[in-house]
Image (cartoon, grey):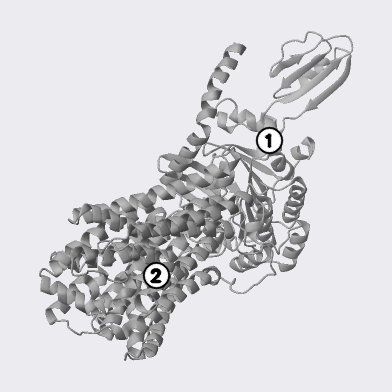
Amino acid sequence: MATDSAALAAGHRPRREAGGGIARGRALVARALRDARVRTLSFAYLFALFAYIQPVGFRSGFPTLSDRAAFARSFGDNKAVRIFYGEPHNIIDVTGYTAWRVGGTLAIFAGVFGLFAAVRALRTEEDTGRMELVLAGGVGRGTSFAAALTAVAVTVVVLWVAEFAGFAVAGLPLGGSAYLALATASVAPVCAGVGALASQLAPSRRVALELGGAVVGVLFVLRVIADTANGLGWLRWTTPFGWAEELRPFAGARPLVLVLPILATVLLLAAAWRLAATRDIGTGLLASRDSADPRLGLLSSPVAQTLRSERASLLIWAASAGAFAYILGLLAKSSSSAGISKSLNRAIGKLGSGTITTPVGYVGFAFIFFILVVSLFACAQIGAARHEEAEGRLETVLALAVGRRHWLTGRLLLALAGAAVISLVCGLLTWLGVQSGGAAISLPKLLEASANCLPVTIFFLGLAALAFAVVPRASAGIAYGLVALAFLWDLVGSLLDVPSWVVKLTPFAHVGLVPAQAFETTDAMVMALIGVSAALLALWAFGRRDLIGH
Amino acid sequence: MTASSSAFAAAPAGGSPTGAAAINTTGLCKRYGDTTALDQLDLTVNAGEVYGYLGPNGAGKTTTIRLLLGLHRPSSGRAEVFGVDAWSEPVTAHRRVAYVAGEPFLWPSLTGRETLEFLANLHGDTDAAYCDELVERFQLDDRRKVRALSKGNRQKVALIAALATRADLLLLDEPTSGLDPLMEVAFRVCVQEAKERGQTIFLSSHILSEVEALCDRVGILRDGRLVDEGTLGELRHLAAQTVEVTFEDGTPELPPLEGVSVLAAGPKALRLSVSGDIGPLIVALAKHPITSLTSREPSLEEIFLHHYDGSEPGGHR
């Protein structure tokens, strides 16, 4: 009997050891992919949809060659538009147009995705102590590191395929589509490399994201400067966002440029690995202060403490949106109506851009983007509230003399105040930019544009709060999903010929493009009213449910 | 605490300022989907009492406390704290309550001192001098940030915050998990002091020695039901005690006696289990020359295991 079991064990052992490293690595990759599936599929959906609607919209918006020629002429010099989409090549053709509209935008999303994916796979695993468990279980550091990044690579490939599929279904040439999608996706691995390096330096997930986010932000701004400032075009070569453009999809492709993102990714990952292999698990190389003299400000109530913990994040939101607003204001003057016919102007309007041929029209169009940003901030605040509950800290608070409705009301008012601050910063900095750039838009008009951000924000904040109260575990996903859907709805709806009442279902269709158009008082009030009602409903429902952990 | 002293334990001091019991639940039920976490719980804890709430993991101890705090909503029945409904008026109820969770959920970026300040502000009524004294006693480095504290040290922060409120009712959910033995002693001293001041303590635990040392009354929970409740003396009375006898000449034949069974027999010694009256056994033993006789009352552990015996493997420790 004893010899039997010994033989059995001996028979098992070689098999397990032979496949051990790879099998464990595979198990880790599978685990990481499971973790990332919702995020990856949402992004893939966005990529495919965006890749599909742009060529289709172009064909329906500019059916004739002369339309397209006029469009290309007017956009050739419009630097303000280049901020979002980059430098246009051959936009007289549907392929060139698609490369310009889709490539620029999705490259930003790909960059953000790569950063988040790497930090999630490396730093968050370490923060939660799970990586310690994995490493204690006989998995080497190399295997764990490689598995985490393999999973990230798989998700990036999924995005590439999704974008390619969107182009292919829209009828673009297959080879060019694959190349364009590759150019877009090439930003993701570089930013993942940034995230991997930041994960080694930062002592926590939050700091890693801030650090990596700052780097990605700078890389993006470099691309914006290269595309808009005279004589600084060479800056494009310093950033992965620029490389994606220099790959020139559908405009005399230069596949050799691919060496740059590959090289950058390899170097960043090699540096990250060097650091990862030598440091203590659970720490970062940047020192974190573990002891401090007490600072007793902003501890008097849950609202005060939330402000204390969220103020850094509020500052980052306001600063990045503000910086962007300043650049927009600066470039607004280059929007001109030269050579644009009335019918073409309407067509551009159908692309979801409003009337962008005058500075004031352009700023009005740009503010839709700020409305989106501020709405996303509101979602992030509900996400933070949910995080507080999931981590069990809300239980600690509510076991004290704090009422739940009181707590949620405070959280919502604080989110609204934060949104107001960001909106105000956007308005003020656009005005400063406009002043420096020499366009003529008055401060009151831009403050009105700031105020115009709030009704939509209240609408989404209320709905997000309701999701938090009713389906807490899914609330953050629902909140972000609603905003993204509503934003794309406008875009899709205005491109495809659907009945106008369907298009009008999204709040973005009810926003007056202040300062170009008037503030839509009735619509704004209706949206705010819906938001407030949803928030009141949320307060009632939250008062009736159990607290729910992870 | 010896067996005899607990048998004569004073009856719990009744009556709070408002006349209501510190804790009172009637027919309290909680279901999560298909699982019944708590089933028809009728529980009364009088003011000034130290009540031990025993049960293995998953028996429903934490659920009970969440219902008492109004964090979860009863499926049916009622939970009252000092006569105030726990679900509908939590804030009123919480002014007289302090809570320590089994897992301390605190804010990673705050230091220990900042956390104590914040929690004191939220409770609204804290003895600052006593708080400082507790920081000393528990040897807490309150300049350290919570994220850099071990679990035991985070538990200390939560405990100090709760004890410093001097609340009328302390709800403690496995409060010593993660504490080292020295700090466990400090904790027991604090609970004794709280008891002497007339505070009510509801101590949920599966550390039996702790409950045995601190509690006036004990309730045993199993699968969401209260299966036994009473003073330690009362509980012991129901369970068997163990008697060990050594004989001078050799183990004699004893007549069959009601409630007495032989656990082990050696050439000169016997170990017996006796439930009920011990008198007939003493009479029977008196006929033989005996070198020693010891009698041991059942430990809480034995009582506890008795309730869980053989029916729920997961419940055994």
Query: From the viewer's perspective, is the residue at label 2 or at label 1 nearer?
Result: 2
* Tag 2 residue: A236
Residue B23 located left or right of residue B211: left
Please report, as a chain letter, where disc 2 is located: A
Looking at the rendering, in which quadrant would you find the C terminus of chain B?
Answer: top right
**Label 2's element?**
helix
Percent x, y for residue A515? 29, 84
Vertical relation: A326 (above or below) B314: below
In this rendered view, identify the residue nearer to me: B166 or A311. A311
The 10 Å Cα crowd at callout 2, few under 14, some 14 to 19, many 20 or more, is: many
Q: Residue at x 62, y 64 (%)?
A: B110
The 10 Å Cα crowd at callout 1, few under 14, some 14 to 19, many 20 or more, is: some
The mark tally for this picture is 2
* Tag 1 residue: B234
For residue A418, the mark is none
- Residue B87 in view here: no
**Label 1's element?**
helix
Percent x, y for residue B63? 52, 47
Residue B132 located left or right of residue B84: right
Percent x, y for residue B129? 75, 67
Q: Residue at x 58, y 73 (%)?
A: A298
How far is the residue under mark 2 from the one under mark 1?
Answer: 84 Å
Vertical relation: A198 (above or below) B37: below
- Residue A148 in view here: yes
Q: Residue at x 76, y 57 (%)?
A: B139
Looking at the rendering, in which quadrant would you find the N terminus of chain B?
Answer: top right
Task: Give the amino acid type for the residue marked by disc 1 in the picture.
Answer: Glu
Percent x, y for residue A346? 15, 77
The image quarter containing residue A284 is bottom right
Whether labels 2 and 1 share one chain: no
